[in-house]
Amino acid sequence: MQILLDTHILLWWLNNDDKLPQTARLLISEADNQIYVSHVSLWEIQIKIMTGKLEANLPAILQALPQNDFQELPTRSAHILELGSLAAHHQDPFDRMLIAQALTESLKLITHDKNVALYSDEIILV
């Protein structure tokens, strides 16, 4: 399975946070699954660090991606076009772009956000 991590799922995984549901842990740790981290999530983390909403070390996060066998997913124009077709279930621009990427790339998006899950049966709510 090809999986895209929502930003909070990524942070919970990297911090071994108890908030990460067991279902997500199992999916991420399954050797046959390919795990992707969007540049959108990295951008979101950096902005939240800069605004004081998050304490994190972005260079350490970037270093942890290959250590966890996570693939980086850059933003493509097709993702931006897909963004324009999304319903208004969710207003967060980062989440909306992650949804657009998941739909465009046929990835399963793992999230803990019930509003994100409204967009597709392919989104895994944990």
Image (cartoon, grey):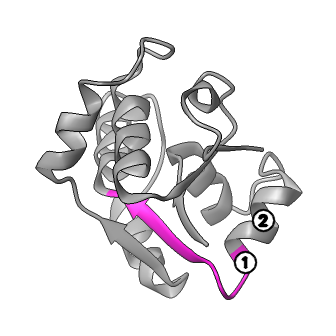
In this rendering, the answer to whether 14 lies above or below 103 is: below
Residue 42 lies, in percent from the top left, at 34, 52
Q: Is residue 43 left or right of residue 115?
A: left
**What's the residue at 33%, 37% (across, down)?**
97
**What's the residue at 78%, 65% (across, down)?**
25
Q: Is residue 74 left or right of residue 25?
A: left
Q: Quadrant of the N terminus?
A: bottom right
Instruction: Identify the amino acid type marked 1.
Output: Ser
Q: Which residue is mark 1?
A: 29
Q: Is residue 74 left or right of residue 60?
A: left
**Is residue 82 located in the magenta-colored stretch of the structure?**
no
Local packing at callout 2 (Cα closer than 10 Å; few below 14, some 14-19, many 20+) is some
Disc sitting over residue 25 in the figure: 2
In this rendering, the answer to whether 118 lies above or below 112 is: above
Local packing at callout 1 (Cα closer than 10 Å; few below 14, some 14-19, many 20+) is some
Q: Is residue 14 left or right of residue 49?
A: right
Magenta residues, start to end: 29-38
Residue 41 lies, in percent from the top left, at 38, 48
Residue that protrudes farthest toward the right in the picture: 22
Instruction: Identify the amino acid type marked 2.
Output: Arg
How far apart are the alpha carbons under marks 1 and 2?
A: 6 Å
In this rendering, the answer to whether 106 lies above or below 63 is: above
- CB under 8 Å between discs 1 and 2: yes
For the residue pair 70 and 58, the one nearer the viewer reads as 70
Q: Quadrant of the C terminus?
A: top right
SS at mark 1 in the image: helix
**What's the residue at 69%, 26% (across, down)?**
114
**What's the residue at 32%, 27% (across, down)?**
51
Residue 44 lies, in percent from the top left, at 35, 40
SS at mark 2 in the image: helix
